[in-house]
Amino acid sequence: MTGMNDWDNLNHQIVSCRKCPRLAQHCEQVAREKRRAYRDWDYWGKPVPNFGDPRAKLLIVGLAPGAHGANRTGRMFTGDRSGDWLFRALHKSGFANQASSSAGDDGLKLVNCAITAVCHCAPPANKPTTDEVQNCRPFLQETIDQLPVRVFLALGQLGWKAMLAEAKRREWWIGKQPKFGHGAKVKLAADRWLLGSYHPSQQNTFTGRLTEPMLDRVFREARRLIR
């Protein structure tokens, strides 16, 4: 189990990373040009650190920061529509102290929960390359090393694949690759679990592919498995 110094050191390493020139350039360019609605904001414009409880038993694994969400606010899922859905569900299930998040200093705290990403920089078109994901993998590995996680929740296909690859590397899972789907559940070694959820992106929420009750059910299951 990690201490606050270890958690802070890991986040410092994430924020300081410049391994992917394409991503660094994109984050900085978005921060300079901004979106008209946020022209008065001082954008974060660099890798976004992990966020949450350094003793978390639930780890949410997302894809990457949004260009005008986390890349603007400096906090995972903060300041965009995906975060609106995620934090509302986290609050309902007791993993967050409030149901919304608009800025890094808005008082949001996660309880027994942390959020990380497969890629910590906002990628063009929300699509990091294979090499960029590989460059970020040590951060995911160190995050898992530090936290006493019982339940991993992968938001989307890429998070699911990254977590299964890591589970296989650690010999927590041996066998055929389980198929991703909303509500998918895999029992890992040492009483750990991997859950799958559709990502709360506008592409999924606007079309009805993901609904609030669907997302709530996933977090209720995570809570049950932790208990």
Image (cartoon, rainbow, N blue to C red):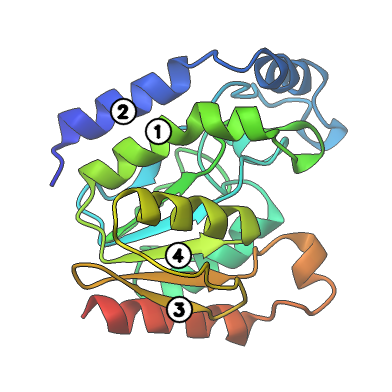
> Measured from the top left, where is residue 78 in percent x and y?
57, 47
Q: Which mark is residue 185?
A: 3
Between marks 4 and 3, how big is the CA–CA gap? 9 Å
Between marks 3 and 1, how big is the CA–CA gap? 24 Å
Residue ID for mark 4: 153
Q: Amino acid at mark 4?
A: Leu
Residue ID for mark 1: 139
Residue ID for mark 2: 10
The foreground one among 177 and 66 is 177
Tags 2 and 1 touching, CB below 8 Å: yes
Q: Residue at x 60, y 38 (%)?
A: 70
Q: Earlier in the sequence, mark 2 or mark 1?
A: 2
Report crowding for label 4: few under 14, some 14 to 19, many 20 or more residues within 10 A (C-alpha).
many
Q: Earlier in the sequence, mark 2 or mark 3?
A: 2
Against 70, is 82 above or below? below
Q: Amino acid at mark 3?
A: Lys
Report crowding for label 2: few under 14, some 14 to 19, many 20 or more residues within 10 A (C-alpha).
some
Q: Is residue 178 visible?
A: yes
Between marks 4 and 1, how big is the CA–CA gap? 17 Å
Q: Can you tell which of label 2 and label 3 is closer to the viewer?
A: 3
- Could you tell me which secondary element the residue under label 1 belongs to? helix
Q: Earlier in the sequence, mark 4 or mark 1?
A: 1
> Measured from the top left, where is residue 169 in percent x and y?
36, 48
Q: Amino acid at mark 1?
A: Phe
Q: On the rendered structure, is 192 left or right of 43? A: left
Report crowding for label 3: few under 14, some 14 to 19, many 20 or more residues within 10 A (C-alpha).
many
